[in-house]
Image (cartoon, rainbow, N blue to C red):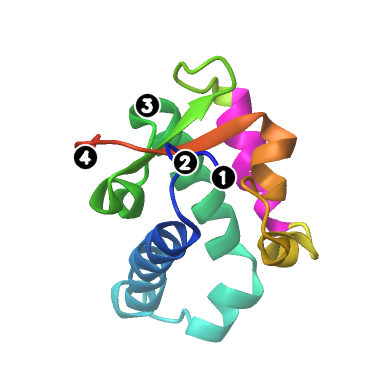
Amino acid sequence: MNPNLGSRRLRWVAVVIDGTVINCVFTTLPEIFNGLSVERIYYSGAPVMAYIIYATLMEYKYQATLGKAICKICIEGRDGLKPTLFQAFLRNASKFIPFEIVSGLWGRDKLLHDIIANTNVIKTPRGNI
């Protein structure tokens, strides 16, 4: 295992933090806009699209989402540079492939979405945001 890669544990903590941020936004929307229900929002797929957009833009601009910055991990392209916008999008959209979530159970250094996008999650001594 590459010692510079971010651990699975840190990656999961980052996902929980980012998921909590998105969830908080979408559970407060019905309070802001009368007539919206939480169920209607979630069934529309809006939280998934919002996560993909949020994570793509954050990883493209800062190489990390809020959760990754807190956990001191970041994304890099295969060449060790900042990922391209396409790599960031491909990485985050491919997280929603149905079997992708189990790709980390086989002890690989990289998860399926990182293989597809040709990216790495690495440790960083500082938060990027």
Give the crowd class for mark 4: few <14, some 14-19, many >=20 residues within 10 Å.
some
Q: Could you give the CA–CA distance between mark 4 and mark 3, rounded to whole angstroms? A: 13 Å
Whether residues under marks 1 and 2 lie with C-beta atoms below 8 angstroms apart, the answer is yes
- Numbered mark located on residue 61 in the image: 3
Q: Could you give the CA–CA distance between mark 1 and mark 2, rounded to whole angstroms? A: 8 Å
- Numbered mark located on residue 5 in the image: 2
Residues 69 and 120: in front is 120
Q: Could you give the CA–CA distance between mark 4 and mark 1, rounded to whole angstroms? A: 23 Å
Callout in the foreground (4, 1): 1
Give coordinates of residue 12: x percent, y percent: 46, 64
Q: Earlier in the sequence, mark 4 or mark 1?
A: 1
Q: What secondary structure is marked by label 3?
A: helix
Callout in the foreground (2, 3): 2
Callout in the foreground (4, 2): 2
Q: Is 127 included in the stretch rendered in magenta? A: no
Give coordinates of residue 114: x percent, y percent: 64, 40
In the rendered image, which residue does mark 1 sit on?
1
- Numbered mark located on residue 127 in the image: 4
Whether residues under marks 2 and 3 lie with C-beta atoms below 8 angstroms apart, the answer is no
Q: Could you give the CA–CA distance between mark 2 and mark 3, rounded to whole angstroms? A: 20 Å
Whether residues under marks 4 and 1 lie with C-beta atoms below 8 angstroms apart, the answer is no
Callout in the foreground (1, 2): 1
Point 47% across, 79% down: residue: 36
Q: Quadrant of the N terminus?
A: top right
Q: Earlier in the sequence, mark 2 or mark 3?
A: 2
Q: What secondary structure is marked by label 1?
A: loop
Residues 51 and 40: in front is 51
Q: Could you give the CA–CA distance between mark 4 and mark 2, rounded to whole angstroms? A: 15 Å
Point 30% across, 80% down: residue: 31
Residue 82 located left or right of residue 86: left
- The magenta region covers 86-96
